[in-house]
Amino acid sequence: MTKKEVRNFLIAMALFVLAALLPIADSGYWLSIGVTIATYMVLSTSWALFSGPTHYISLATGAFYGIGMFIVGGGIDLLPYWMLVVIAGCAGAILAALIGLATLRLSGVYFVIFTLGLAEFVRQIVTWIQTTMGSSSGLYVLTDLNDTIIYWELLVLGALVYLIGWWINRSRLGFALRIIGNDEVVAVHCGINTAYSKVILFIFSGTVATIVGALLAPRLSYIESNIAFSPMLSFIVVITALLGGAQKLWGPIVGVIPFMLVWDFLTATFPNQTTLMLGICFLLVVYLIPNGFAGLIEKYLPLRHQER
Amino acid sequence: MNALSALSVQNTTKRFGGLVAVNQMSFELRTHEVLGLIGPNGSGKTTMLNVISGALKANSGFVSLFGKVISDQPANLIARSGIARTFQLVRTLNSMNALENVEAGGVFGHRRLWKNSLRSQAIEMLDKVGMAGSMNNPISSLTYIDQKRIELARALMSNPRLLLLDEWLAGLNPSELQIGIDVINNLKSEGHTIIIVEHVMDAIRSLCDRCVVMNTGKKIAEGKPEEVLEDEGVIQAYLGSEHA
Amino acid sequence: MEILLGGILLGGTYALIAMGLQLQYGVSRIMNLANGEVLVAGSFCAFWLFMGAQVNPILAIIVIAPAAYILNWFIYTYFLRPLVKRSKTQGHLEVDSILSTFGISFIFIGLMHAIFGGEYFNYEYLEIPYEIFGQAYGVNRIIAFICAVIFALSLYVWLSKTRSGLKLRAVSVNPESAKLVGIDVDKTSAMAFSLGGAVTAAGGSLISMFDTFDASIGVVFTMKALIIVILGGVKEIKGTIVAAFVLGLAETAVATLIDPGLTLAAAFLLFILVLLFRPQGLFGRESP
């Protein structure tokens, strides 16, 4: 590791410890928004690991997240909670692999549409299974896990995502993805198995999203398909990641924190206009800050040394 | 098939709907040979290269590299088995600098370098194409010929067993052209096996050991450059029948 | 038989809305994810005109379609053209336009929600049963079908037989070459985009005759139109029409035989199958 990497690592550690202390300072509003921010931090960062370099916009986050919730909801009476989280991760990985193999050979538009429909598709299937099996439309998840523990769980997961992301960016896989993002034809003729590289990253982000859903299930305590498969979630992940800058590992978190604070305020003040505001956010990001906050920071802070 | 055959194309056909772009093409290429693939515009040269490099799948026939059939493989595996190429319209990786562009060719293909050996090889390749001075420059700051050189260096990074150059000399001015010809000549003297698709006849004459001439997807002549360029059929194909 | 007729009736309107999207994606190369919202806006206008002034929804199209044309022209000129100019590659434009049209669609939903509220809407127009082969169908459905077919056919004839239609098709096949033969690609793209919007809104008016709708249903129609276009092959108009009927039949079959709650799932399944086995579409061709 270079000196700079050691420094960055220490800064990250300090921030992590600082973030972990939040539940001690406050257990009401700030912890609750802390959980939300931690949730989107994990989701957006893992989303950007896949979508940043490849430019494939995935709207599947909500589907994975919902599946994670339902796995916990469906199995909580049968198996221990931690095992359900593991199962959720595996299920997410398998689903992501199948989706990736089917769609990632094709152009980005097909992928967007596919993932857009996925959450609704899964929701219809889940609802249909529930009604034909005669069970009620919701599931109870009653555990003794409170917000503090969920918050810490998410922080640890987030730290893991960062470590893996950092490792991927330094590896051949990360280099391959950057080449793919630049020009897929060149990538193929350089000998890169483009489908494989993309699928691996998509599996990673799908697995993380499913685990996040599983971790958050105890917080809701009553899980219903309309809430678990909310399409809004996928869009907020996209917008926060882009707002921060999807090209950098640390980009999404720079977007998540201010966005969630403002968003929380706005949705509380104008509860009926959330869709309209989300639309405006999308347009603002596309037209005014196409490279996100990370892009702005890089542009206006003079670079001290050429980065790799 | 003789033992020295580097590439063998046999009865290859490629159709797009009703259009037959490559029609029953067959030819051989020996090791250390430089072959010119020439013909008028739209005669199927680039499609032929795309079939060899795996960008397109042939409808029938097969291609083999050193006796091993490759035409049933995807393009990335063909690259890995040792075919590298450049593109008719230069394709560079625009968000990366010159050095990274070159490195891209040496990590996943026929050679799988990483870290220090990758970097030193990439610098060596940049030097070979005369670009060592601009290794940290962003691609967008380079001129067209320099981008073409970067693309060539990227192809060479994999230490290819066969190099495909698709109109690599097109669009260069006379002095650049001479530099370009010298670069390829050096590769030739190093013993590279190369297929050149080209319109610049001076380059064909000075570089190629042999030529294959295509017209409307078919091979119409094959032989030494000076011979095929005198051939009645070839002149007719290039200039139209009224000139013959 | 019931499934067959129901599917055909549904397929007619689907063909129309898919052609709207196809004009936008095939010619202007913009994947307009706000397409479904334009459709719903058309439905709301028809509803409003019918409830307010008793205007029949077919006549209302005379107002709705030009209004949608102007609105879409505005969207293209002020929102999408800057993206076309700014993007260096087709891939870049794709990402930008997807995000931008998502934004526009949310704004549409938000506005419609603010004006009309979140309830479901429908109105009764010609809800007279009419028997075909022993099975009753609403006259409104049949009329909507006939109108859709007339519109779709005239659009098809216009595209394939007239000079301006030829322009559109030229830009669709190759914008670079179209430029060389003196076609104003930018203008033609704007026109195709606006026309696509107008066709979609007209479809919305027709759908409102027999279906319930709400402010946020647009995305369902966007999905369906996209699935049809991809199923038929992006640049194949005939393919789109056939695919629209395929989807109409598949949905009706699933709704009658299994569960009406699974229609979108059926459409989606069809989509998966196409992606897996024929990604260029049923009628699509490989290009050099």
Image (tube, coloured by chain):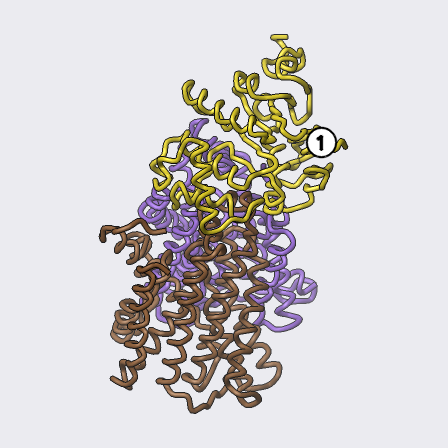
Chain colours: A brown, B yellow, C purple
In front here: A75 or C159?
A75
Quadrant location of the C terminus of chain C in the rendered image: top right
Q: Which residue is drawn at 59% across and 78% down?
A: A129
Quadrant location of the N terminus of chain C in the rendered image: bottom right
The answer to whether residue B85 is above or below residue A56 is above
The answer to whether residue C163 is above or below residue C61 is above
The quarter of the picture where residue B188 lies is: top right
Task: Give me the chain letter of mark 1.
Answer: B
In this view of the protein, can residue B243 be seen by the observer? yes
Q: Is mark 1 on a helix, strand or loop?
A: loop
Q: Which residue is drawn at 38% across and 74% down?
A: A39
Q: In this view, does B33 lie to the left or right of C72?
A: right
The answer to whether residue A75 is above or below residue C14 is below
Q: Which residue lies furthest to the right in this view?
A: B1
Three-letter code, disc 1: Leu
Q: Mark 1 points at which residue?
A: B4
In this view of the protein, can residue C150 be seen by the observer? no
Q: Residue at x 48, y 81 (%)?
A: A224
Q: Position of residue A264 (x, y in %)?
A: 28, 73
The quarter of the picture where residue A281 lies is: bottom left
In front here: B229 or B220?
B229
- All told, the count of numbered labels is 1
Q: Where is residue A144 in the image (x, y as percent from the top left)?
A: 42, 91
The answer to whether residue A159 is above or below residue A286 is below
Q: Position of residue B124 (x, y in %)?
A: 45, 38
Q: Which residue is drawn at 60% across and 48% down?
A: C280
Q: Where is residue A249 in the image (x, y as percent from the top left)?
A: 37, 61
Q: Residues within 10 Å of mark 1 (few under 14, many from 20)?
A: few
Q: In this view, does B33 lie to the left or right of A35?
A: right
